[in-house]
Image (cartoon, grey):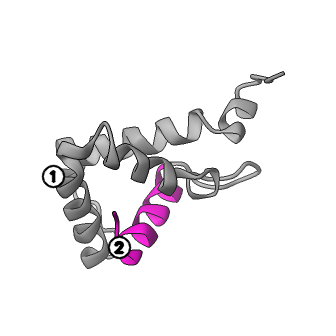
Amino acid sequence: MLTDTQRATLAAFADIVIPPDDAPGGADTGAVAFVENLLARELAPRAADYAAFLDSLAETGMDFSPELEATPIFRLAAETIHEAYWTSAAGKRAVGFVEN
């Protein structure tokens, strides 16, 4: 669904939203695949907007203006990265959730 450039931009955005440190960042926890799955299903009506947002980020070199950060698509993108992270194994470990 996403282009290679959009996937790379999404991975970079994921690591800005959840930077890697002693735990994996957003990209390393599978955010790109998670978001692509959402865009193919639940977020299908927003997929074109999401792709355009990623294109815009790529064109501006990830320059976040206050106006961009106030947009619904920016908030949606950040929320999907958080959802990807906190539902991943690394995110669950970060909060002490242990699966059997």
The three-letter code of the residue at mark 1 reads Glu
Q: Earlier in the sequence, mark 1 or mark 2?
A: 2
The structure residue drawn at horizontal position 31% and vertical position 74%, both measured from the top left corner, is: 58
Residue 15 x/y as whole percent: 53, 58
Q: Quadrant of the N terminus?
A: bottom left
Residue 57 x/y as whole percent: 29, 68
The answer, for residue 21, to whether it is visible in the render is yes
Asked which quadrant contains residue 79, the reply is top left
The structure residue drawn at horizontal position 23% and vertical position 52%, both measured from the top left corner, is: 47
Q: Which mark identifies residue 67?
A: 1
Q: Which mark identifies residue 3?
A: 2
Around disc 1, counting alpha carbons within 10 Å, would you say few (fewer than 14), some (14 to 19), or many (20 or more)?
Answer: few
Q: Main secondary structure of the magenta part?
A: helix
Query: Magenta residues?
Result: 1-17
The three-letter code of the residue at mark 2 reads Thr
Furthest residue toward right: 100
Closer to the eye: label 1 or 2: 2
The structure residue drawn at horizontal position 71% and vertical position 41%, both measured from the top left corner, is: 90
Q: Left or right: where does residue 51 sit relative to residue 79?
A: left
Q: Is residue 11 above or below residue 95?
A: below
Q: Does 48 lie within the magenta span?
A: no
Q: Which mark identifies residue 83?
A: none
Helix, strand or loop for disc 1: helix
Counting the numbered discs, the total is 2
Q: Does 3 lie within the magenta span?
A: yes
The answer, for residue 70, to whether it is visible in the render is no
> Dots 1 and 2: beta carbons under 8 Å?
no
Residue 54 x/y as whole percent: 29, 64
